[in-house]
């Protein structure tokens, strides 16, 4: 069918009539527009016509098969609903633009983006299987795309790097999975998941950045990061997780993953808020955890932690518990209201903490056991149900500039073969003893003020040894016969340095 020779002005339009056909095609400038089903009965016919723009009305059915339609050339499709019948509804490549389109597939998947930088804007997807896949070296642009019902939301794989903004996913499985070498940036992403998988999963060598992530509800976990993933989260809110199975932590990081998580709030975790294991090396900045059904932060294995500005509130369990060979540091830690310890280190953990505030824990503020080593610089420990500082077994703690007071039992308890060095600070107004050492414990206090405690300010029993330096010894001390008390010279005090974790 040949075109009538009408030239078209760029400032307006004229009809170009296909001879021998009743359909009407419209040309705007150099762009040809066709309508489905008015001009063509199917999307395939509209694509075959060479149209630059295809306007859909109502529901347009796609043929059965592995792929409903392949969009492999530049075309702009707007409006209406594309309904697949199994397989993939659409396979999309370079130069494709979908605007205001609904994609449905009651027995299959949604959109598979394989190449180029196609644009999806104001698109709604409702399918049985996977809502969308970005793969290859594609660089899709996603704007205001809503997945309202799918088994899984978006899968990012191979070397894709999508640019997304204002995205929403409601899936029974994972809302987002990023794998292989996938990168890209997704902003203002709101997700929900059911009882099958974590809401967001990142693995392989993926390095996608999520800005403004909101997890409305996660049946299992909210974030599961593993492999060698370098996922970046820049601001977000996990509102609730573990609603279907509280055994899954809100955030799990394992293997050799190295994610960076900044300005994230985690609320209402059914179980643990965070579980770190394997050889992961996570980085946390400005993370708040509130209302957990178990320990707020738990770690094991050979994790290397780098955290700053970590706040934990209302944990049904401990605030921070590490075992295994975990190492690293936490700078500026606040733990408020836990039903167990504030910070517990055991096995061969080595941790450096600074600017620590722990209050309202039913257990100890700091409990060091096993062969764990801890260094705590500048701490405020108060209103605790157990000894504020409890060093046991072969644990060792260096405590610098600590304020310990108003606790329901002892201020400090050192027992077994544990070691404690405390330099600077106060131990006062505790209902029990200020300092209690027993077993074969060894403790040294440099420039520490111990006074106004309910029991003895210092009590040494068994074969415990304590050495005092840097000021007058406290009043009201009890040293049992086999225990040892000595006062060091000022020179000894000056040359004693804490051992780093």
Image (cartoon, rainbow, N blue to C red):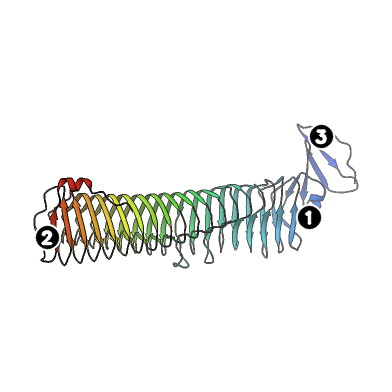
Judged from the image, the secondary structure of the residue bearing numbered disc 3 is: loop
Task: Tell me the quadrant of the picture where the C terminus can be found.
Answer: bottom left
Q: Residue at x 81, y 53 (%)?
A: 45
Q: Quadrant of residue 62?
A: bottom right
Q: Position of residue 68 (x, y in %)?
A: 74, 59
Q: Can residue 149 be seen at all in this image of the molecule?
A: no
Q: Nearer the viewer, mark 3 or mark 2?
A: 2
CA–CA distance in space, label 3 to label 2: 99 Å
Q: Is residue 319 left or right of residue 149?
A: left
Whichever of callouts 3 and 1 sits on the residue coming sooner in the sequence is 3
Q: Position of residue 28 (x, y in %)?
A: 77, 38
Residue under pointer 3: 8
Residue under pointer 2: 456
Q: Residues within 10 Å of mark 3 (few under 14, many from 20)?
A: some
Residue under pointer 1: 42
Depth order, front residue of 496/434: 496
């Amino acid at each position: 069918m040949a075109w009538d020779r009408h030239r078209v002005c760029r400032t307006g339009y004229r009809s170009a009539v296909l001879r021998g056909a009743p359909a009407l095609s419209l040309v705007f400038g150099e762009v040809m527009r066709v309508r489905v089903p008015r001009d063509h009965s199917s999307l395939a016919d509209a694509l075959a016509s060479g149209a630059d723009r295809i306007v859909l009305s109502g529901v347009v059915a796609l043929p059965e098969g592995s792929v409903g339609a392949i969009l492999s050339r530049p075309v702009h499709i707007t409006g209406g609903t594309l309904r697949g019948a199994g397989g993939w509804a659409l396979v999309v490549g370079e130069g494709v633009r979908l605007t205001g389109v609904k994609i449905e597939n009651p027995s299959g998947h949604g959109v598979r983006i394989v190449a180029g930088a196609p644009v999806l804007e104001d698109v709604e997807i409702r399918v049985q299987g996977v809502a969308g896949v970005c793969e290859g070296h594609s660089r899709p642009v996603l704007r205001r795309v809503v997945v309202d019902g799918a088994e899984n939301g978006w899968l990012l794989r191979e070397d894709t790097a999508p640019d997304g903004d204002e995205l929403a996913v409601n899936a029974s499985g994972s809302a987002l999975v990023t794998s292989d070498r996938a990168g890209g940036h997704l902003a203002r992403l709101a997700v929900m998941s059911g009882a099958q998988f974590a809401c967001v999963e990142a693995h392989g060598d993926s390095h996608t950045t999520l800005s403004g992530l909101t997890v409305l509800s996660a049946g299992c976990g909210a974030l599961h990061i593993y492999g060698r993933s370098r996922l970046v989260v820049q601001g977000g809110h996990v509102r609730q997780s573990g609603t279907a199975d509280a055994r899954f932590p809100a955030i799990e990081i394992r293997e050799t993953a190295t994610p960076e998580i900044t300005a994230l709030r985690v609320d209402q975790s059914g179980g643990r808020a965070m579980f770190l294991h394997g050889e992961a090396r996570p980085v946390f900045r400005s993370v708040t955890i509130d209302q957990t059904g178990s320990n707020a932060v738990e770690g094991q294995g050979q994790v290397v932690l780098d955290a700053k500005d970590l706040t934990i509130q209302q944990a049904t369990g401990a605030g921070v518990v590490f075992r295994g060979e975990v190492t690293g540091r936490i700078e500026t830690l606040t733990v408020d209201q836990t039903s167990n310890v504030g910070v517990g280190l055991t096995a061969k953990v080595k941790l450096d903490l600074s600017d620590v505030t722990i209050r309202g824990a039913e257990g100890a503020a700091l409990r060091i056991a096993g062969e764990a080593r801890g260094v705590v610089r500048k701490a405020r420990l108060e209103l605790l149900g157990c000894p504020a500082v409890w060093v046991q077994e072969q644990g060792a703690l260096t405590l610098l500039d600590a304020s310990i007071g108003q606790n329901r039992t002892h201020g400090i308890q050192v027992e077994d073969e544990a070691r404690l060095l405390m330099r600077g600070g106060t131990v006062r107004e505790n209902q029990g003893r200020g300092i209690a050492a027993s077993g074969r414990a060894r403790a040294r206090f440099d420039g520490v003020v111990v006074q106004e405690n309910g029991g003895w300010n210092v009590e040494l029993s068994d074969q415990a040894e304590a050495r005092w330096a840097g000021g007058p010894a406290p009043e009201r001390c009890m040293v049992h016969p086999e225990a040892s008390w000595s006062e060091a010279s000022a020179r000894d005090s000056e040359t004693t340095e804490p051992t780093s974790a």
